Amino acid sequence: MTEDSQGVPDLTKGRNKVAGTIVVAHAVKHVYGSGQSSLIMPEISIDLELTRSQFGFLNTASAVAWWSSTMISGYLGDRFSNRAGLMLAISLCLMGVSLFLAGLAPNYTTMLGVMFLVGIGPSMFHPPAIGELSRRFPDRRGFAVSLHGMAANVGEVLGPLTVAGFLTVMIWRDLLKAGLVPALLVALVVWIMMPSRKADLQTEVTSVRKYFLSLVGLLHNRMLLLLIAATAIRSMGEGGVGAFLTLYMRDELKYSVTAVAVFLSAAQVAGIVSQPLMGYLSDKVGRKPVLVVGTGLMMLSAFAMSVAKTNIQLFPIVLVRGALSFSLHHIFVAAALDAARGVAQSTVVSLIYGAGFLGTVSPYIAGRISDAYGIPSAFVYSGVVMIIPTIMLAVARFPKSGDAFDTEAEQANTRVT
């Protein structure tokens, strides 16, 4: 890693290797996450004979831990941004260990506690990963962040198919326990490929006090606050669909595990194409049109899902969700980084991811609605909620993505000269 005359690391050197490592690790993380959420969670519900409210609360417990850990990870990502590789390795280790414990949980009460642990490991990945990408690719932020998101789609394609294949030869408990070793191996590889670098004391958060000062400053940014609020409400809307789509397919439509896996994996293939395309478009034409159109389509897909009964009706809806879900979220992240103009970038990522805290109650609310009126009513609830962020984004005034890069370049020039 080369440095300038002031001892500041040149983060553009070797950035392709770092980006490749982050992208592959993120894909692996989603292989685990998508397999667990889409196929293993319904099997847990069936095996433990859970009510839909209990099933929803398992998702809520995991989401609460996910939010809490994301906020902590945002601080660590800025405080120790030179050790991003180590933090990613720890995240992957915790993911493997928590899923191993889920394979041992004998009943609902124990599983509830384990699901809280399951939310911690994966949530610690994004702030240091995206923060590092943002620091290394300030000139192509939307595209770089979208590559990170594309890796999620790759994982979402492979995860259900991989888990479905293993579930044909072993029970879900054994599969969760067997997944520990690969997770630890990938963590080791990430640690080796992303060694710690010398810290830039002029740009790193060097104390808790400095962190909170930067956080207070960020929370005075009106555009950032709007994006956080829109993300929070959007996550609440998507929570109802995300928690109950696969259960709806398995329990009410009587799809096989393999059929569910094929549906979800095919949908994520669309996301692999849409991620870099949406990132490129957001860099060229602006974040706003991409976010408004994407959020509106997600809203309409939730309403459409409530009346879909056949393969022909359901598949295109799932396809739209697969193309937009991760893609849209990463454009939110890029827009927030633009609004923050290079300040506390891992913290900005954690604020956008952490905004999903409002969505932690959504699976439980959707579960109560489903117990009373059926699962399709949960999709209607999600669509109604999604109207709000669509309107918020449509009336907002976004900064140009180039403005953020210009400001960071000025700051860099001032530091060097």
Image (tube, rainbow, N blue to C red):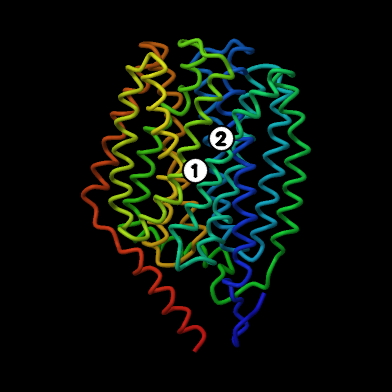
Q: Quadrant of residue 47?
A: top right
Please indicate whether residue 26 sits to the left or right of residue 298 in the image: right
Judging by the rendered image, the residue that carries numbered circle 2 is: 157
> Residue visible at 63% across and 80% down?
3
Q: Residues within 10 Å of mark 2 (few under 14, many from 20)?
A: many
User: Hey, what amino acid is under mark 2?
Assistant: Val
Please indicate whether residue 374 sits to the left or right of residue 46 in the image: left
Residue 322 vs residue 99, the one in the foreground: 322
Q: Are marks 1 and 2 in contact (CB under 8 Å)?
A: yes
Q: Position of residue 219 (x, y in %)?
A: 38, 58
User: Hey, what amino acid is under mark 1?
Assistant: Ile
Q: Position of residue 77 (x, y in %)?
A: 58, 58
Please indicate whether residue 97 sits to the left or right of residue 252 in the image: right
Residue 51 vs residue 139, the one in the foreground: 139
Q: Is residue 303 above or below residue 21?
A: above
> Residue visible at 34% across and 46% down?
229
Secondary structure beneath dot 1 equals helix
Judging by the rendered image, the residue that carries numbered circle 1 is: 272
Q: CA distance from mark 1 to mark 2?
A: 9 Å
Q: Position of residue 187 (x, y in %)?
A: 72, 48
Q: Is residue 62 above or below residue 404?
A: above
Secondary structure beneath dot 2 equals helix
The numbered mark at residue 218 is: none
> Residue visible at 52% across and 36% down?
64
Q: Position of residue 22 (x, y in %)?
A: 61, 54
